[in-house]
Image: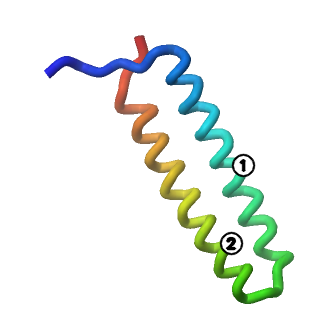
Amino acid sequence: MEQQNLGPHETMEIHELLNFKTICLAKSKMMQGLVFDKDLKTLMQKDVQQSIQAINDLQTLYTRIPTQ
């Protein structure tokens, strides 16, 4: 099986997505302390969990596939 490589632009796009999801995670975690509505707080907690999963997936992809 031939090893897959990422091009420089693909590596940069994954890096940008990783930065974006990290910022979203930080913002959601900070805002949770300011929210008093139970439904909104639940939605924000779900966003935090999904962001953590997305970051883990992107980090795995970023480290497993070598660049050219």
Give the mark, 1 or 2, whose residue is nearer the N terminus: 1
In the rendered structure, the answer to whether residue 10 lies left or right of residue 1 reads: right
Its colouring scheme is rainbow
Residue at the farthest top position: 68
Name the residue that disc number 1 marks: 23
- Could you say which is closer to the camera, residue 30 or residue 7? 7
Q: Circle 1: is it few (<14), some (14-19), or many (20+) Cα within 10 Å? A: few
Question: For residue 16, which quarter of the picture?
Answer: top right
- Could you say which is closer to the camera, residue 60 or residue 44? 44
Q: Quadrant of the C terminus?
A: top left
Residue at point 66% right, 39% down? Answer: 19
x and y percent of residue 50 in the render?
Answer: 54, 62
Residue at point 59% right, 72% down? Answer: 46
The kind of residue on which mark 1 rests is Ile
SS under mark 1: helix
Residue at point 54% right, 32% down? Answer: 14
| Labels 1, 2: front one | 2
Q: Compared with residue 22, is residue 67 higher up or lower down, i.e. above or below?
A: above
SS under mark 2: helix
Question: For residue 20, which quarter of the picture?
Answer: top right
x and y percent of residue 28 in the render?
Answer: 73, 64
Q: Compared with residue 22, is residue 65 higher up or lower down, i.e. above or below?
A: above
Tell me if label 1 and label 2 are in contact, CB under 8 Å.
Answer: no
